[in-house]
Amino acid sequence: MAFDNLSDKLQNVFKNLKSKGRLTETDVKNALREVRLALLEADVNFKVVKNFINGIQERAVGSDVLNSLTPGQTVIKIVNEEMIKLLGDETTEIKLKSSNEITIIMMCGLQGAGKTTTAAKLAGKFKSKGKQPLLVACDIYRPAAIEQLKINGEKQGVDVFSMGDKHKPLNIVKASIEYALKNNKNIIIIDTAGRLHIDEDMMEELHEIKSNVDVDQTILVVDSMTGQDAVNVSEMFNDKLGIDGVILTKLDGDTRGGAALSIRAVTGRPILYAGMGEKLSDLEQFYPDRMASRILGMGDILTLIDKVQSDFDEDKAKELEKKIKKAEFDFNDFLEQMQQLKKMGGIQEVMSMLPMGNQMKDVNIDDKAMGKTEAIIYSMTIEERTNPNVLNSSRKRRIANGAGVDISEVHRLVKQFEQSRKMMKQFSGMMGGKAGKKNKGMFKMPFGF
């Protein structure tokens, strides 16, 4: 998971700070030395680390902080505020023209950064907001790039404009604008060619498009797992081409997170989105305050709620609420809740968004266990799923054999299910009145894991 290593180290530093009743200037400096090392090990740019630590030290080493009732908490608050500032203070949206005008977005980046997939993900985001995007295939060099864009565009329900690989990218873009005008498209997303490294030919091709077409947004896609290289690439693209923002890909696989913490400070350009998985839906708006909270082990409840609201069906949630109140929650519902949890990225992803969830990452609840649970439920008959009370010893043995697990696993699941059903029934009693309105969305949350 993103930032795991860095989060663990920062949590240890904070734990030591909070354990002291009073802090001396030496205590703060020692803690910041540990923070500095943690950031450098996370592949954060050296100059960025230096400025970050200096900014914290200026604020933290003062009588107001050291003599406060909770000096440890106050220092942590300062670290959080400085990290938000480092990541960009405010969330930045991609600037779009009015609906009756065409916004042209040019995607650029090195080969392998995930530019083509990200272009399709972005198109899907715009479409879900009621826009009419058009993907334009201008990567005429990479084998199967055009086909990849077509496949991803089809999955998103977005049109893809292509003229094959025999035309110049500039001519393809010009033709796509005519097509967009005739077909009521209001956003054009250009998927340009990448290279294994920055070279003059690539830059010239991108410059030619920008010089002859009114490009509104130039967005750089970088692979966060390349760490400091991602920062260097961002700086070079910004210097040579001029970029309006960055999309970080593969952030879910980068346990260090150095690129996310460096790019804004080095380029002065905002991080717009973060790719958090391989699915076309796994592109998250980048919120500096939420990301800082996750890095510091404080959770990210707001993003978790966003995921719940976007991935869960309102009608099914209402139906589930009725079943819970009547104690009719069955294994079919249990299975559906698991599948909903998968949509949100799995247990570990959800755990990472809970306050101090990183402290529970070693608890034995993982996505492999979910797969085993699914196998057990699929081995049940329709009657057994809808009426768990019929599950006697012989039925459980048959289910265990069908799922390829020990019978103790079936016993454990049935017991866990009964406990979940009781808990959910109790929870339903809390949903009346003002509290019910406030917590209504939480009925969509998967329980029992």
Image (spheres, grey):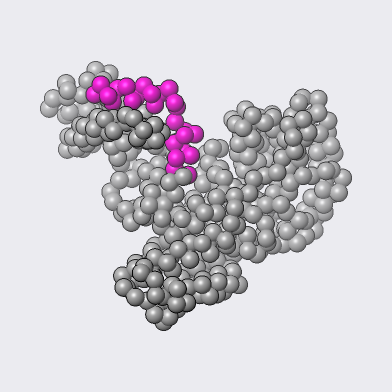
In the image, 239 versus 81, the foreground residue is 81
The magenta stretch is 303-327
Q: Is residue 371 positioned above or below 31 on the image?
A: above
Q: Which quarter shows the C terminus?
A: top left
Farthest-out residue, top: 383
- Measured as percent of width and height from the top left, residue 8 is found at 39, 62
At 27% from the left and 18% from the top, the residue drawn is 382
Question: Residue 91 colored magenta?
Answer: no
At 36% from the left and 28% from the top, the residue drawn is 336
At 67% from the left and 52% from the top, the residue drawn is 245
Residue 385 seen by the camera:
no
- Measured as percent of width and height from the top left, residue 368 is found at 34, 42
Number of numbered discs overlaid on the protein picture: 0
Image quadrant where residue 25 sits? bottom left
Image quadrant where residue 192 sits? top right
In the image, 344 versus 441, the foreground residue is 441
In the image, 194 versus 420, the foreground residue is 420
Question: Residue 308 colored magenta?
Answer: yes
Farthest-out residue, bottom: 26
Q: Main secondary structure of the magenta part?
A: helix
- Measured as percent of width and height from the top left, residue 44 is found at 55, 66
